[in-house]
Image: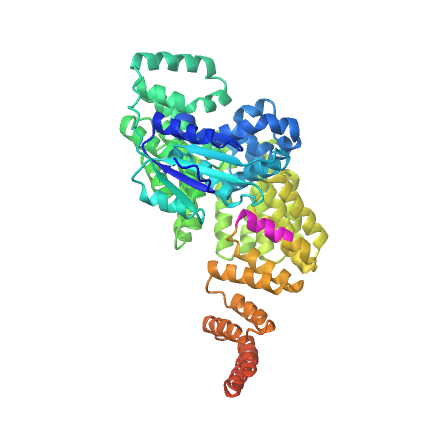
Amino acid sequence: MTSNTKQLIIWVGNAGEQRTQAAQAWLADQTAARTWLLSMNRANLGHWAGLNSFVSSLLPAIKAQAPELLVKYDYELALVLPQLQRELAVRNPSLTDISNPQERTRNYAADRAFRIVQGLIDLVHEFRQTAPDQPWVIVCDQFDQAGSLVTMFFKELLRRADPRMSLTIGFLVEPNQPELLNEYHSWHAHVEVVQGAWQADPPIVIDPAEAKRQLEVLEREHTFDPIEIELHLPQLIQLATAANEPRKRLGFMHEGLSICSTRGLYADALYYGEPLRVAMEHEFPKSVDFRLSAYLKLYNCYIGLKQAEPALDIAETAVSITDNPARLYSWYYLIAMIHARFAEPRDFDKAEYYLDLGIEAINKADIPAHEKLFQSSFNRNGLALIRHFQKRPLEAIEICQECYKNLETGLDTEDHKLHRSVLLYNIAQVYDSLKDYPKAIEYYSLTIEMDPNYAEYYNERANIYLHIGDYAAAERDYQRSIELSPPYTEVWTNLGQCYQVQEHFEKAIGAFSRALDIDPKNVVALNHRAECYEGLGQTQAAIADYSASLKLKTSEASTFANRAILYYELGEIEASLADLNTAISLQPDLAELYENRAVALEALERHAEAEHDRQQAILLAKAHEVNG
């Protein structure tokens, strides 16, 4: 191995003891640095493999030097290190977090997992401010076997690395993976690749009898402790496989699927769920309830990842293996939602057909009356969504209000509280679409009263306050949303716009910069930050942001037009004209663009062309008056 320090080093060679020893020797030479050698093998150590060891290694110093970070990042820490739940009470749980599985009618959006990663990186950055000033060198063994979010963490840690602090990350990966190497090269401008001739270790074979003995010991010690089950899940799966205990193996795989899907870690959930589906359909096709349970979790994963086709395949498979109305009604609803929300194009007639099948199944099902009441309300909420999409908002509101009333009068106060809050939220959204802002605020407030720790509700109510000009209320809600969630780019962008409309440009730039630190491809934040730089007279910074925006979204006429104005102010007339030409080619019916180009052409003494553009602007303005 080389001792040349780069920000990203990739060692390529066969996995095994020789490769690991070579990494250890190289790290031993990094005498001025704090070093880590992390094992990233998800199959052996679980979906947080490597990242959990890294975070755990920081905990003693965090507790000693910055204990407030344990509270600030309690949510992220409890996910990566579940054993911390025994000593760390996670603050501000939402109804999504605490509802039991039977009442959990809302799943996390897929970007929730991305937010968790960003929160962990914030934790590392804040802790490092208190740690000794020394380089950090992190080597990730078997990085090509890492979990989805662990991979994302190290990619994002590298991207967001504080340039004032030295950070070197190394990956140890297997050979013959050109696509993977190309992916890693996209993570940083300068990547060092080192080829190694290490011998692979022979496969480890566990004696079935010994595997069975170890499995029985683990089960006896940990069966009734969900935290220990999660911590030992990879070992349990491997031992059940070696012991030829297929039912137990699939049961543990189902547990992994359940843990990850419930927490919104959908890509990692599929690591357990997709092979589970193949195995249970092949080995236990008659275990209908077990299959349906796994199918539901797989469906939620695919929907969370916006993969409608495999979700529909799962749902149709579920319907094909049961004729029990008590099992069918939920699947009819799920199929309806694919056609109403996720299919391209949407098919509302087919969606409504499946909702009606669901109502028929509910009526036939042998379930308690209070459950029929809830399931009927849940089904009709789906119909309300369709009416909203069909631009029949008053019908949508009426359906939701009727469902809410039925649940309030027919169920105990705490029963299905999550779904009641969702009904109120849906009513708020419809009023928002009708621009009935007082009613929208009223229903958002009722929703928040019922589920006060769900960050997204504050963000959406704040958007209305911003729209109606109540900036203090908007800022208050945006800040509360930020407090309640791992960092997400949308709320910081919205907070920036709140500051911007008040001409608090410095504060707005700070908020937009935070949004862009989380997601540098946030075009909205780039464009608005550029406008704020304009407001402060920082023309070059504004041009840089507009240029970055145009690299991401090349067909925005308004962005070309805005940059053209700045080029003109700097005296770069040819550059201004080029941008205006592009803007007009993208939006040829906007009079203002021709007026601006006429000014640029006059500056270049191209008077006839300038006059032509002025006349064109007049014609377009008149046409606009006639049409609108």
Q: Residue at x 42, y 40 (%)?
A: 9
- 475 vs 416: above or below: below
- 74 vs 625: above or below: above
Provide residue 551's location: percent of width, then percent of height: 47, 60
Can residue 374 be seen from the camera position used here?
yes
Provide residue 157's location: percent of width, then percent of height: 51, 41
User: Which quadrant, please, contains the N terminus?
Assistant: top left
Residue bounds of the magenta highlight: 510-519
Would residue 365 appear left or right of 574 to someone viewing this image? left
Which color scheme did the rendering employ for the protein?
rainbow
Would residue 454 appear left or right of 577 to someone viewing this image? right
Seen from the viewer's position, the closer of residues 193 and 304 is 193
Q: Taken as a whole, is the magenta stretch helix, strand or loop?
A: helix
Q: Is residue 65 magenta?
A: no
Would residue 196 appear left or right of 54 to someone viewing this image? left
Provide residue 199's location: percent of width, then percent of height: 29, 28
Seen from the viewer's position, the closer of residues 223 and 355 is 223
User: Which quadrant, please, contains the C terminus?
Assistant: bottom right
Q: Is residue 511 magenta?
A: yes
